[in-house]
Amino acid sequence: MSRDDGDGNSAYGRRTFKRSKAHFADRITTDGRDGWPVEAGRYRLVISRACPWASRSLVSRRLLGLEDALSLAVADPIQDDRSWRFTLDEDGRDPVLGIRYLGEAYGRRETDYPGGVSVPAIVDVPSGKLVTNDYQQLTLDLATEWTALHREGAPDLYPDALRDEIDEVMADVYEDVNNGVYRAGFATEQEEYETACAGVFRRLELLAGRLERQRYLVGDTITEADIRLFTTLVRFDAVYHGHFKCNRWKLTENQVLWGYVRDLYQTPGFGDTVDFDHIKRHYYQVHTGINPTRVVPLGPDLSGWLTPHHREELGGRPFGDGTPPGPVRVEERVPAAHTP
Protein backbone atom coordinates (compact mmCIF):
# COMPACT_ATOMS: atom_id res chain seq x y z
CA MET A 1 0.00 0.00 0.00
CA SER A 2 1.52 3.28 -1.01
CA ARG A 3 0.89 6.92 -1.57
CA ASP A 4 2.63 9.09 -4.12
CA ASP A 5 4.70 11.74 -2.34
CA GLY A 6 3.57 15.32 -2.67
CA ASP A 7 -0.13 14.65 -3.15
CA GLY A 8 -1.15 14.11 0.45
CA ASN A 9 -3.82 11.92 1.92
CA SER A 10 -6.63 14.08 0.55
CA ALA A 11 -5.77 12.84 -2.95
CA TYR A 12 -7.33 9.45 -2.19
CA GLY A 13 -10.62 9.20 -4.04
CA ARG A 14 -10.05 12.36 -6.06
CA ARG A 15 -8.28 10.86 -9.06
CA THR A 16 -8.51 7.70 -11.11
CA PHE A 17 -6.92 4.82 -9.22
CA LYS A 18 -3.99 2.96 -10.74
CA ARG A 19 -1.94 0.35 -8.90
CA SER A 20 1.76 1.12 -9.28
CA LYS A 21 4.22 -1.65 -10.04
CA ALA A 22 6.97 -2.21 -7.51
CA HIS A 23 9.85 0.09 -8.41
CA PHE A 24 12.41 -1.84 -6.40
CA ALA A 25 12.13 -5.43 -7.59
CA ASP A 26 15.43 -6.88 -6.37
CA ARG A 27 15.07 -10.35 -4.95
CA ILE A 28 16.64 -11.89 -1.86
CA THR A 29 17.66 -15.35 -3.03
CA THR A 30 19.63 -18.37 -1.94
CA ASP A 31 22.33 -17.67 -4.52
CA GLY A 32 22.28 -13.89 -4.01
CA ARG A 33 22.11 -13.23 -7.75
CA ASP A 34 20.72 -9.70 -7.24
CA GLY A 35 23.37 -8.96 -4.63
CA TRP A 36 21.10 -9.84 -1.73
CA PRO A 37 21.73 -13.37 -0.41
CA VAL A 38 19.39 -14.97 2.12
CA GLU A 39 21.04 -14.42 5.48
CA ALA A 40 19.54 -14.70 8.96
CA GLY A 41 19.41 -11.39 10.80
CA ARG A 42 20.51 -9.23 7.89
CA TYR A 43 17.13 -7.90 6.76
CA ARG A 44 14.14 -6.18 8.37
CA LEU A 45 10.58 -6.56 7.14
CA VAL A 46 8.57 -3.33 7.39
CA ILE A 47 4.81 -3.73 7.42
CA SER A 48 1.60 -2.05 8.44
CA ARG A 49 -1.05 -4.25 10.01
CA ALA A 50 -3.57 -2.06 8.20
CA CYS A 51 -2.33 -2.94 4.73
CA PRO A 52 -3.53 -6.13 3.00
CA TRP A 53 -0.46 -6.32 0.77
CA ALA A 54 1.87 -6.08 3.79
CA SER A 55 -0.26 -8.49 5.78
CA ARG A 56 0.49 -11.21 3.23
CA SER A 57 4.14 -11.11 4.21
CA LEU A 58 3.26 -11.10 7.90
CA VAL A 59 1.16 -14.27 7.54
CA SER A 60 3.84 -15.97 5.44
CA ARG A 61 6.57 -15.10 7.93
CA ARG A 62 4.49 -16.59 10.77
CA LEU A 63 3.55 -19.77 8.92
CA LEU A 64 7.13 -20.38 7.80
CA GLY A 65 8.65 -19.58 11.19
CA LEU A 66 10.98 -16.86 9.96
CA GLU A 67 10.66 -14.63 13.04
CA ASP A 68 14.25 -15.22 14.17
CA ALA A 69 15.68 -14.84 10.67
CA LEU A 70 13.73 -11.77 9.51
CA SER A 71 13.00 -9.09 12.09
CA LEU A 72 9.80 -7.06 12.00
CA ALA A 73 9.04 -3.35 12.05
CA VAL A 74 5.42 -2.24 12.38
CA ALA A 75 4.50 1.20 11.05
CA ASP A 76 1.81 3.45 12.48
CA PRO A 77 -1.48 2.81 10.65
CA ILE A 78 -1.99 6.57 10.31
CA GLN A 79 0.26 7.97 7.61
CA ASP A 80 1.11 11.60 7.32
CA ASP A 81 2.07 13.22 4.03
CA ARG A 82 5.54 11.64 4.24
CA SER A 83 3.83 8.26 4.36
CA TRP A 84 4.68 5.35 6.68
CA ARG A 85 6.22 6.39 9.98
CA PHE A 86 7.50 4.65 13.13
CA THR A 87 5.55 6.62 15.71
CA LEU A 88 4.52 3.40 17.49
CA ASP A 89 8.13 3.02 18.62
CA GLU A 90 9.90 4.88 21.40
CA ASP A 91 11.04 8.35 20.29
CA GLY A 92 9.27 7.78 16.97
CA ARG A 93 12.19 5.83 15.51
CA ASP A 94 12.50 2.23 14.43
CA PRO A 95 14.81 0.74 17.08
CA VAL A 96 16.84 -1.28 14.56
CA LEU A 97 17.00 1.01 11.52
CA GLY A 98 17.08 4.24 13.54
CA ILE A 99 14.78 6.05 11.11
CA ARG A 100 11.53 7.97 11.62
CA TYR A 101 10.06 7.32 8.16
CA LEU A 102 10.28 4.33 5.85
CA GLY A 103 10.95 6.85 3.09
CA GLU A 104 14.44 7.35 4.54
CA ALA A 105 15.35 3.79 3.55
CA TYR A 106 14.00 4.47 0.07
CA GLY A 107 16.16 7.60 -0.10
CA ARG A 108 19.29 5.66 0.87
CA ARG A 109 18.61 3.28 -2.00
CA GLU A 110 17.83 5.91 -4.63
CA THR A 111 18.36 9.63 -4.19
CA ASP A 112 15.32 11.75 -5.07
CA TYR A 113 13.21 8.65 -5.66
CA PRO A 114 10.00 10.06 -7.19
CA GLY A 115 7.53 7.28 -6.42
CA GLY A 116 5.33 6.33 -3.50
CA VAL A 117 6.59 4.78 -0.27
CA SER A 118 4.92 1.39 0.12
CA VAL A 119 4.73 -1.58 2.43
CA PRO A 120 5.68 -4.36 2.61
CA ALA A 121 9.30 -3.44 2.28
CA ILE A 122 12.47 -5.27 3.18
CA VAL A 123 15.41 -3.15 4.30
CA ASP A 124 19.06 -4.20 4.50
CA VAL A 125 19.97 -3.49 8.13
CA PRO A 126 23.75 -2.90 7.71
CA SER A 127 23.34 -0.28 4.97
CA GLY A 128 19.86 0.98 5.86
CA LYS A 129 18.89 0.71 2.19
CA LEU A 130 15.63 -0.57 0.84
CA VAL A 131 16.04 -3.93 -0.88
CA THR A 132 12.60 -4.59 -2.31
CA ASN A 133 9.01 -3.39 -2.22
CA ASP A 134 7.82 -6.03 -4.69
CA TYR A 135 4.76 -7.21 -2.79
CA GLN A 136 3.90 -9.82 -5.42
CA GLN A 137 7.27 -11.59 -5.44
CA LEU A 138 8.28 -11.05 -1.82
CA THR A 139 6.11 -13.75 -0.29
CA LEU A 140 6.88 -16.23 -3.05
CA ASP A 141 10.56 -15.82 -2.26
CA LEU A 142 9.94 -16.28 1.47
CA ALA A 143 8.33 -19.60 0.58
CA THR A 144 10.91 -20.83 -1.94
CA GLU A 145 14.24 -19.03 -1.41
CA TRP A 146 14.32 -18.87 2.38
CA THR A 147 13.75 -22.60 2.90
CA ALA A 148 17.02 -23.17 4.77
CA LEU A 149 15.73 -20.82 7.48
CA HIS A 150 12.17 -22.18 7.68
CA ARG A 151 11.06 -23.68 10.98
CA GLU A 152 10.79 -27.44 11.30
CA GLY A 153 7.32 -28.41 10.09
CA ALA A 154 6.84 -25.32 7.94
CA PRO A 155 4.17 -25.81 5.24
CA ASP A 156 4.92 -25.69 1.53
CA LEU A 157 2.97 -22.59 0.55
CA TYR A 158 3.92 -22.73 -3.14
CA PRO A 159 4.23 -26.43 -4.03
CA ASP A 160 5.89 -26.98 -7.37
CA ALA A 161 3.26 -29.38 -8.70
CA LEU A 162 0.46 -26.86 -8.14
CA ARG A 163 2.17 -23.60 -9.14
CA ASP A 164 0.41 -23.18 -12.49
CA GLU A 165 -3.00 -23.51 -10.86
CA ILE A 166 -2.01 -21.32 -7.91
CA ASP A 167 -0.74 -18.63 -10.30
CA GLU A 168 -3.96 -18.72 -12.31
CA VAL A 169 -6.16 -18.41 -9.23
CA MET A 170 -4.00 -15.64 -7.76
CA ALA A 171 -4.12 -13.65 -11.00
CA ASP A 172 -7.93 -13.65 -10.97
CA VAL A 173 -8.08 -12.85 -7.26
CA TYR A 174 -5.62 -9.98 -7.71
CA GLU A 175 -7.40 -8.39 -10.64
CA ASP A 176 -10.97 -8.58 -9.39
CA VAL A 177 -10.72 -8.79 -5.60
CA ASN A 178 -7.40 -7.62 -4.13
CA ASN A 179 -7.14 -4.70 -6.54
CA GLY A 180 -10.82 -4.57 -7.48
CA VAL A 181 -11.93 -3.21 -4.12
CA TYR A 182 -9.48 -0.34 -4.51
CA ARG A 183 -10.66 0.44 -8.03
CA ALA A 184 -14.20 0.61 -6.68
CA GLY A 185 -13.31 2.60 -3.59
CA PHE A 186 -11.15 5.17 -5.34
CA ALA A 187 -13.34 5.51 -8.43
CA THR A 188 -14.08 9.08 -9.46
CA GLU A 189 -16.81 8.30 -12.02
CA GLN A 190 -20.05 6.32 -11.61
CA GLU A 191 -19.37 3.93 -14.48
CA GLU A 192 -15.82 3.30 -13.27
CA TYR A 193 -17.15 2.43 -9.82
CA GLU A 194 -19.97 0.21 -11.07
CA THR A 195 -17.66 -1.77 -13.34
CA ALA A 196 -15.13 -2.39 -10.56
CA CYS A 197 -17.76 -3.21 -7.93
CA ALA A 198 -19.55 -5.64 -10.25
CA GLY A 199 -16.22 -7.33 -10.95
CA VAL A 200 -15.53 -7.75 -7.23
CA PHE A 201 -18.80 -9.56 -6.57
CA ARG A 202 -18.72 -11.59 -9.76
CA ARG A 203 -15.35 -12.99 -8.74
CA LEU A 204 -16.42 -13.53 -5.13
CA GLU A 205 -19.38 -15.57 -6.33
CA LEU A 206 -17.11 -17.68 -8.54
CA LEU A 207 -14.73 -18.22 -5.63
CA ALA A 208 -17.63 -19.21 -3.40
CA GLY A 209 -18.62 -21.83 -5.96
CA ARG A 210 -15.10 -23.22 -5.91
CA LEU A 211 -14.84 -23.18 -2.12
CA GLU A 212 -18.21 -24.83 -1.65
CA ARG A 213 -16.57 -28.05 -2.85
CA GLN A 214 -13.11 -27.78 -1.30
CA ARG A 215 -11.65 -26.36 1.87
CA TYR A 216 -8.82 -24.38 0.27
CA LEU A 217 -8.38 -22.65 -3.07
CA VAL A 218 -5.85 -25.07 -4.59
CA GLY A 219 -5.23 -28.62 -3.42
CA ASP A 220 -6.03 -29.78 0.09
CA THR A 221 -3.64 -27.54 2.04
CA ILE A 222 -3.12 -23.83 2.63
CA THR A 223 -1.16 -22.16 -0.16
CA GLU A 224 -0.08 -18.67 -1.16
CA ALA A 225 -3.42 -18.29 -2.94
CA ASP A 226 -5.31 -18.57 0.35
CA ILE A 227 -3.07 -16.00 2.01
CA ARG A 228 -3.73 -13.49 -0.76
CA LEU A 229 -7.49 -13.93 -0.66
CA PHE A 230 -7.63 -13.92 3.14
CA THR A 231 -6.03 -10.51 3.58
CA THR A 232 -8.76 -8.90 1.47
CA LEU A 233 -11.66 -10.91 2.89
CA VAL A 234 -10.70 -10.22 6.50
CA ARG A 235 -11.04 -6.48 5.77
CA PHE A 236 -14.19 -6.76 3.70
CA ASP A 237 -17.00 -5.98 6.14
CA ALA A 238 -14.85 -3.67 8.28
CA VAL A 239 -13.78 -1.30 5.50
CA TYR A 240 -14.49 -2.38 1.93
CA HIS A 241 -18.25 -2.81 2.34
CA GLY A 242 -18.80 0.72 3.64
CA HIS A 243 -15.74 2.83 2.99
CA PHE A 244 -15.11 1.46 -0.51
CA LYS A 245 -18.82 1.07 -1.35
CA CYS A 246 -18.50 -2.67 -2.11
CA ASN A 247 -21.91 -3.15 -0.57
CA ARG A 248 -23.95 -5.56 -2.67
CA TRP A 249 -23.69 -7.90 0.29
CA LYS A 250 -21.56 -8.38 3.38
CA LEU A 251 -19.17 -11.26 3.72
CA THR A 252 -21.17 -12.48 6.69
CA GLU A 253 -24.13 -12.90 4.31
CA ASN A 254 -22.28 -15.40 2.11
CA GLN A 255 -22.26 -18.72 3.94
CA VAL A 256 -19.35 -20.23 1.99
CA LEU A 257 -16.95 -17.28 2.05
CA TRP A 258 -17.79 -16.41 5.65
CA GLY A 259 -17.05 -19.98 6.67
CA TYR A 260 -13.84 -20.05 4.62
CA VAL A 261 -12.42 -16.82 6.02
CA ARG A 262 -13.34 -17.81 9.59
CA ASP A 263 -11.58 -21.13 9.06
CA LEU A 264 -8.41 -19.30 8.07
CA TYR A 265 -8.79 -16.66 10.77
CA GLN A 266 -8.91 -19.38 13.40
CA THR A 267 -5.83 -21.10 11.93
CA PRO A 268 -2.57 -20.16 13.73
CA GLY A 269 -0.63 -17.68 11.61
CA PHE A 270 -3.67 -15.92 10.13
CA GLY A 271 -5.99 -14.32 12.66
CA ASP A 272 -3.22 -13.77 15.18
CA THR A 273 -1.65 -11.25 12.76
CA VAL A 274 -4.85 -9.19 12.26
CA ASP A 275 -5.38 -5.86 14.02
CA PHE A 276 -8.91 -4.60 13.30
CA ASP A 277 -8.21 -1.29 15.04
CA HIS A 278 -5.25 -0.54 12.76
CA ILE A 279 -7.29 -1.56 9.72
CA LYS A 280 -10.27 0.67 10.48
CA ARG A 281 -8.29 3.71 11.62
CA HIS A 282 -6.05 3.60 8.57
CA TYR A 283 -8.75 3.45 5.95
CA TYR A 284 -11.18 5.88 7.56
CA GLN A 285 -8.62 8.41 8.82
CA VAL A 286 -6.04 8.38 6.02
CA HIS A 287 -8.34 8.38 2.98
CA THR A 288 -9.67 11.87 3.62
CA GLY A 289 -10.63 12.32 -0.02
CA ILE A 290 -13.28 9.66 0.65
CA ASN A 291 -13.97 10.29 4.35
CA PRO A 292 -13.13 13.96 5.05
CA THR A 293 -14.53 13.83 8.61
CA ARG A 294 -12.09 11.04 9.54
CA VAL A 295 -14.82 9.52 11.73
CA VAL A 296 -14.21 5.80 12.33
CA PRO A 297 -17.34 3.62 12.57
CA LEU A 298 -17.94 1.55 15.70
CA GLY A 299 -18.89 -1.64 13.84
CA PRO A 300 -18.94 -4.26 12.67
CA ASP A 301 -19.34 -6.67 15.59
CA LEU A 302 -16.25 -8.90 15.64
CA SER A 303 -17.55 -11.70 17.85
CA GLY A 304 -18.57 -13.86 14.87
CA TRP A 305 -14.95 -14.41 13.86
CA LEU A 306 -14.53 -17.00 16.60
CA THR A 307 -17.71 -18.99 15.94
CA PRO A 308 -17.57 -22.57 14.55
CA HIS A 309 -17.10 -22.74 10.76
CA HIS A 310 -17.45 -26.50 10.13
CA ARG A 311 -15.10 -26.30 7.14
CA GLU A 312 -13.15 -29.28 8.46
CA GLU A 313 -16.05 -31.40 7.16
CA LEU A 314 -14.64 -30.80 3.66
CA GLY A 315 -11.41 -32.56 4.63
CA GLY A 316 -8.07 -30.98 3.84
CA ARG A 317 -4.95 -30.66 5.94
CA PRO A 318 -4.12 -27.03 6.75
CA PHE A 319 -0.35 -27.56 7.00
CA GLY A 320 -0.01 -30.68 4.87
CA ASP A 321 2.68 -32.88 6.37
CA GLY A 322 3.83 -29.96 8.51
CA THR A 323 2.67 -28.46 11.80
CA PRO A 324 1.09 -25.21 12.99
CA PRO A 325 3.39 -22.34 13.96
CA GLY A 326 4.07 -21.82 17.64
CA PRO A 327 2.64 -19.04 19.80
CA VAL A 328 3.07 -15.44 18.70
CA ARG A 329 6.08 -13.91 20.39
CA VAL A 330 5.10 -11.45 23.11
CA GLU A 331 6.40 -8.33 21.37
CA GLU A 332 4.44 -9.12 18.20
CA ARG A 333 1.06 -9.86 19.76
CA VAL A 334 -1.93 -7.83 18.61
CA PRO A 335 -3.53 -6.03 21.59
CA ALA A 336 -6.57 -7.93 22.84
CA ALA A 337 -8.72 -4.82 22.45
CA HIS A 338 -8.05 -4.89 18.70
CA THR A 339 -9.29 -8.47 18.23
CA PRO A 340 -12.59 -10.36 18.60
Image (tube, rainbow, N blue to C red):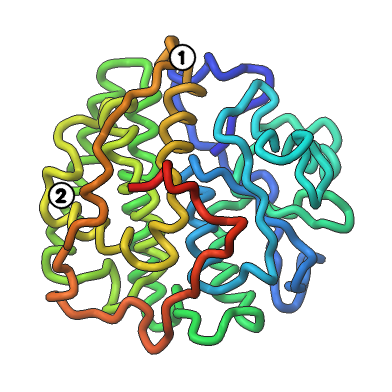
Secondary element at image label 2 = helix
Q: Quadrant of the N terminus?
A: top right
User: Label for residue 289?
Assistant: 1
- The residues tagged by marks 2 and 1 sit, at their Cα atoms, a distance apart of 30 Å
Residue 8, placed above or below residue 319: above
Secondary element at image label 1 = loop
Residue 89 in which image quadrant: top right
Image location of residue 182, percent across then percent down: 39, 33
Amino acid at circle 1 = Gly
Residue found farthest to the right: 127
Sequence order check: which comes first, mark 2 or mark 1?
2
Residue 105 in which image quadrant: top right
Residue drawn at (60%, 48%), measured in percent from left and top? 47
Q: Tell me the residue that label 2 is attached to.
A: 205
Is residue 287 left or right of 87 when viewed as pictured? left
Image location of residue 227, percent across then percent down: 40, 60
Residue drawn at (18%, 38%), measured in percent from left and top? 250
Badge 2, how many Cα within 10 Å: few under 14, some, many 20+?
some
Is residue 7 left or right of 318 when viewed as pictured? right
In front of the other: 170 or 240: 240
Residue drawn at (43%, 18%), measured in percent from left and top? 13
User: Label for residue 127?
Assistant: none
Count of numbered badges drawn on the protein: 2
* Residue 175 visible in the snapshot: no
